[in-house]
Amino acid sequence: MSKARWNQLAAQVKRCRHCPRLIEHCRTVAAVKRKAYRHEKYWGRPVPNLGAPDVGLLVVGLAPGAHGANRTGRMFTGDRSGDWLYRALHRAGFANQPKSESRRDGLELIDTTVTNICRCAPPDNKPTREELSNCRPFFSETLQLCNPIVVLALGALAWKATVREVIELGWLGPLATSPGFFHGAAVKLNNHRWLLGSYHPSQQNTFTGRLTEPMLDDVFQSARKLIKQRRTLS
């Protein structure tokens, strides 16, 4: 049943037209294109999850890149952020290869799903509160269907949205103050689940050295250990 519902969720995401500003932006970028990709056909619409339900690790980003996932139709695929993410996933044993360039490049995730809290590429990479609210049901259902042992939030906005959802789902009890975001943050959730935080592998962070590959590797190794511990208990 979860697999059937997972496929239905993907279809709903692709059909979604709740945010006219985002839909228009995705279509405009797809029509104008970047010079380097002028001969490619852009996806140009909402991007579904990459992966499967019932996984150990759920990676949560902010939104598709205008010339990355909005071009290729696959989460974190075709831009520098994705280059960093999939190299790290591969090194940690969560992906079968270190590259994610197109939907037909042979990439397979291992016990992992990748999602975003916003499914359309937003102008200036800044979705509005209303747009994030419109996408929230997709994210909530993704969490429930994936039922992960570890949720890894990439960046402060993904962290904030994830904290709100895990409280709503009863995975984290009500707190006087919300857990703060920082690289390497770790919050224990109910039923031996964990929420981890990492700086987003955006060019703003990787080009400046705020996020290095060893730093990202450390977070994924922590996720690997926590998943193993939980399954040992089971």
Image: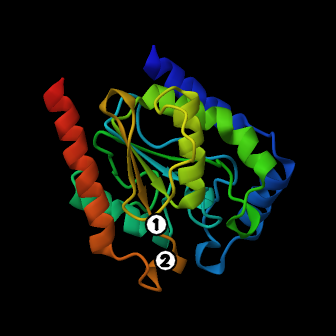
Pointer 1 with pointer 2, Cβ within 8 A? yes
Q: Quadrant of residue 140?
A: top right
Q: Give the quarter of the figure containing the N terminus.
A: top left
Q: Quadrant of the C terminus?
A: top left
**Mark 1 falls on what kind of element?**
loop
**Label 1: few (<14), some (14–19) or many (≥20) C-alpha neighbours in 10 Å:** many
Q: Nearer the viewer, residue 63 or 27?
A: 63
Name the disc covering residue 199, or none: 1
Query: In what element is the residue under mark 2?
Result: helix
Q: Residue at x 18, y 39 (%)?
A: 228
Among the two numbered marks 1 and 2 on one chain, the one whose residue lies closer to the N terminus: 1
- Residue at 81 percent across and 46 percent down: it is 19
- Residue drawn at x 55%, y 57% as measured from the top left: 72
Q: What's under tag 1, amino acid-wise? A: Tyr
Q: Can you give x and y, in whole percent of width and height, for residue 219 in the image? A: 31, 59
Q: What residue did someone put label 2 on?
A: 205
Where 42 falls versus 53 (above or below)? Answer: below
* Category of crowding for the residue at label 2, using alpha-carbon neighbours closer than 10 angstroms: few (below 14), some (14–19), many (at least 20): some
Say which residue appears at 54% left-offset and 79% top-offset: 204
Q: Identify the mark at residue 39; answer none if there is no mark.
A: none
Amino acid tagged 2: Asn
Q: How many marks?
A: 2
Report which quarter residue 198 is drawn in: bottom left
